[in-house]
Amino acid sequence: MQVCAIHEPDTWITPYQRYMADGVLPMDSTEARKIKKNSNRFTLIDGELYRFGFTHPLLVCVHGEKCMRIMVELHEVFLGVTSGAELWQQELSVQVITGPQ
C-alpha cells in the first residue's frame, strides 16, 4: 500500500486560515500585522475562508482550480441562453473573492 501526501501551495488565503484556526502568524512582522488587522473582515467555517460582504452576508474566498471553475461557469452563464431576469438573479447571487481587497 502506498500513501501519497498532497500539499497545496500557500496562497493569500493560507495565512488567514492559519491565524484564525490556530493563532499562527507569519514570521514577517509587517505581514503578521496586516493579517492580524484584516482578519476581522473574514470568518472561518469548516476550514473555508469567507469574507464579510457589504451587501451580502458572506463571500467565499477561492483560489486556483476552484476559482477557474467558477469563472468558466460564470462565462458560460453570460454567453449561454439565459433570460434577463435569470441573469440578474445569478449575477447578484454569485460573488467571488480572489484576493485581498
Image (tube, grey):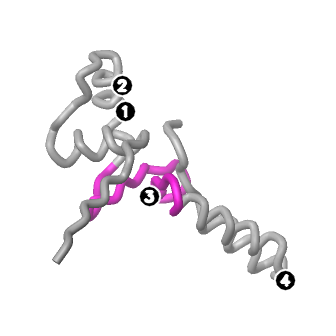
Mark 3 Cα shell of 10 Å, populated few (<14), some (14-19), many (≥20) = some
Say which of marks 2 and 3 sits in front. Answer: 2
Q: Which mark is residue 81?
A: 4
Mark 1, residues whose alpha carbon is within 10 Å: few (<14), some, or many (≥20)? few
Whole-Å distance between the Cαs marked 1 and 3?
A: 15 Å
Residues in magenta?
43-66
Task: Tell which circle, 1 or 3, labels the residue nearer the N-terminal end.
Answer: 1
- Label 1 – label 4 distance at C-alpha: 40 Å
Tag 3, which secondary structure?
Answer: strand
Q: Is residue 31 above or below residue 41?
A: above
Residue pointed to by mark 1 = 38
Distance of mark 4 from mark 3, alpha carbons?
A: 28 Å
Counting residues from the start of the chain, the first of labels 1 and 4 encountered is 1
Residue type at mark 2 is Lys
| Depth order, front residue of 98/69 | 69
Question: The residue under label 1 is which amino acid type?
Answer: Asn
Task: Report which residue position mark 2 lands on.
Answer: 34
Amino acid bearing label 3: Leu
Distance CA(mark 2)–CA(mark 1): 6 Å
Question: For residue 99: magenta?
Answer: no
Nearer to us in this view, 59 or 63: 63
Pointers 2 and 1 in contact (CB under 8 A)? yes
Point out which mark residue 58 bears: 3
Q: Residue 88 location in percent, x, y?
A: 74, 70
Res. 5 image quadrant:
bottom left
Q: Dots 4 and 2: beta carbons under 8 Å?
A: no
**Residue 60: assigned label:** none
Residue 85: x %, y % from top left: 78, 78
Q: Residue at x 43, y 50 (%)?
A: 52
Name above or below for residue 16 compared with residue 66. Answer: above
Tag 4: Cα neighbours inside 10 Å, few (<14), some, or many (≥20)?
few
